[in-house]
């Protein structure tokens, strides 16, 4: 991750009446534990359809077998 990027980690926002998904807490721990976690200032949230639109511009998409709700995550890296 890169400290020069505005939106390092983007999540699909959940509905206001739903509890904060547990998977987000796991993501936060993993990111903060990594060396790149120093650049992490918090999650950015997008509404579902906005998240899908932004994902169309992704360089790469990784699909896992998880069925966990709100496990979608976008990680952005600056210059490689």
Image (cartoon, helix red, strand yellow):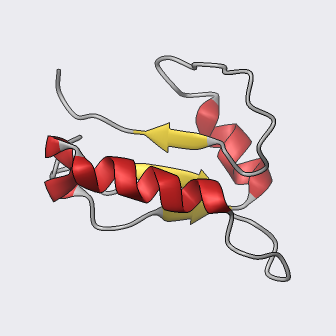
In the displayed structure, does residue 72 sit left or right of residue 9?
right
In the displayed structure, does residue 69 sit left or right of residue 1?
right
Q: Which of 33 and 8 is in front in this view?
A: 33
Residue with the most extreme right position: 17
In the displayed structure, does residue 53 sit left or right of residue 2?
right
> How many marks on residues?
0
Question: Where in the figure is residue 1, as x and y percent of width and height?
Answer: 23, 40
Q: Which of 72 and 31 is in front in this view?
A: 31
The quadrant in which residue 7 appears is bottom left
Q: Nearer the viewer, residue 8 or 33?
A: 33
The residue under the point 50% across, 54% down is 26
Q: Quadrant of the C terminus?
A: top left
Question: Where in the figure is residue 16, as x and y percent of width and height?
Answer: 79, 81
The answer to whether residue 10 is above or below residue 17 is above
Question: Where in the figure is residue 50, as x and y percent of width and height?
Answer: 70, 51
Q: Can residue 40 be seen in this view?
A: yes
In the displayed structure, does residue 38 sit left or right of residue 72?
left
The answer to whether residue 3 is above or below residue 14 is above
The residue under the point 72% across, 40% down is 52
Q: Can residue 8 be seen in this view?
A: no
The quadrant in which residue 79 appears is top left
The residue under the point 64% across, 61% down is 22
The answer to whether residue 69 is above or below residue 59 is below
Residue with the most extreme bottom position: 17
The quadrant in which residue 47 appears is bottom right
The residue under the point 42% across, 51% down is 9
């Amino acid at each position: 991750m890169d400290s020069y990027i505005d939106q390092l980690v983007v999540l699909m926002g959940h509905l206001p009446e739903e509890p904060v998904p547990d998977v987000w807490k796991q993501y936060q721990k993993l990111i903060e534990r990594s060396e790149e976690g120093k650049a992490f200032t918090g999650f950015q949230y997008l509404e579902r359809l906005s998240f899908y639109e932004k994902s169309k511009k992704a360089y790469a998409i990784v699909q896992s077998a998880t069925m966990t709700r709100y496990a979608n995550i976008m990680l952005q890296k600056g210059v490689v």
